[in-house]
Amino acid sequence: MFAAEGARVTVTGCNCGAGSKTAEDIREAGGEALFLPMDVTDEEQVLRVREETLARYGRIDILVNNAGIVSDGFLTKLTRQAWDKVIDVNLTGMFNCTRAMVPAMIGQGFGRVINAASVVGIYGNLGQSNYAATKAAIIGLTKVWARELGPKGITVNAVAPGFVVTGMTAGLPEKVLNRVKERTPLGRLGQPREIAYAYLFLVSDEASFVNGAILSVDGGLVL
Ligand SMILES: NC(=O)c1ccc[n+]([C@@H]2O[C@H](COP(=O)([O-])OP(=O)(O)OC[C@H]3O[C@@H](n4cnc5c(N)ncnc54)[C@H](OP(=O)(O)O)[C@@H]3O)[C@@H](O)[C@H]2O)c1
């Protein structure tokens, strides 16, 4: 969707097959995209993506901090390894990427940063101590960065999706999904496209005065 709006896109991720295919699909549709492998927990890889993106496009206007994982467990069963893994990817990964890309935006006097939060960071969820901790922290980070970077022409906003049909929710038991649907006034899960529209709005000219916002896109789950 960003490419369709004219953005030149660097697709990143650990899964090279899926990432290359996404970049290829964008190019086939007439857009401009490259795929670069990047684990957000690896600072060297993040810096390499910054350098290669700048070499290719000359600037970085938008950063979408979308990488996120879950590794659930009730508090007394949650291992230290599962705790560390989720904190590393969801939180430290976002710190790594933002710290690396923002200097280019400061140099330009313009930038847009979107952070993937979650309704779970607002109201919590059973078995998700680690995930909820990262998503609540992301809400805090968004507000800090909005204050720090606003004066430099950079807006920082977060989207807090409800339950969306993606790989992340694919393994959830039917019973859990039905309970979520019952609690959602719109009576259904979200589609990835409905989250992407919110991302797109927050980087658009129409959102030029939106900064530090946490936009819930959850069908009314959290009211
Ligand atoms: N689905 C939901 O219901 C929901 C609700 C609220 C918030 N969210 C948030 O939305 C974001 C996207 O999630 P999703 O639902 O699309 O989940 P998903 O289908 O599991 O996708 C997760 C994405 O994160 C990337 N990723 C994971 N670990 C990474 C790492 N170490 N380095 C770089 N990239 C990494 C994956 O890319 P590779 O596989 O290429 O590494 C993949 O693109 C996440 O931040 C998630 O917490 C999702």
Image (tube, rainbow, N blue to C red):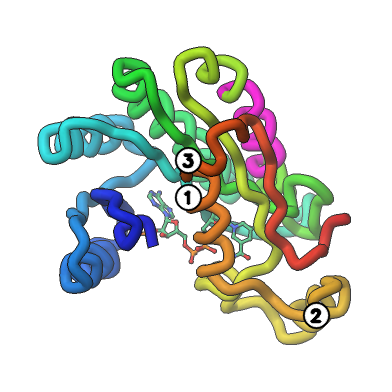
Q: Give the range drawn in magenta.
A: 134-145
The residue to which callout 3 is attached is 205
Q: Which of marks 1 and 2 is nearer the N terminus?
A: 1
Image coordinates of residue 102 in percent, x first then y, are 38, 24
Q: Which of 170 and 219 is in front in this view?
A: 219
- Tell me the element at label 3: helix
Q: In which quarter of the image is the C terminus?
A: bottom right
State the CA–CA distance, disc 2 to disc 3.
Answer: 32 Å
The residue to which callout 1 is attached is 66
Q: Mark 1 CB in 8 Å range of ligand 1?
A: yes
Disc 3 crowd, CA 10 A, few/some/many (<14, 14-19, 20+): few
Q: Quadrant of the N terminus?
A: bottom left
State the CA–CA distance, disc 1 to disc 2.
Answer: 25 Å
Mark 3 and mark 2 in contact (Cβ < 8 Å)? no
- Tell me the element at label 2: loop
The residue to which callout 2 is attached is 187
Q: In this view, does 148 lie above or below 121?
A: above
Task: Name the residue located 62 percent from the left edge and 36 percent from the top edge.
Answer: 138
Task: Name the residue located 17 percent from the left edge and 72 percent from the top edge.
Answer: 28
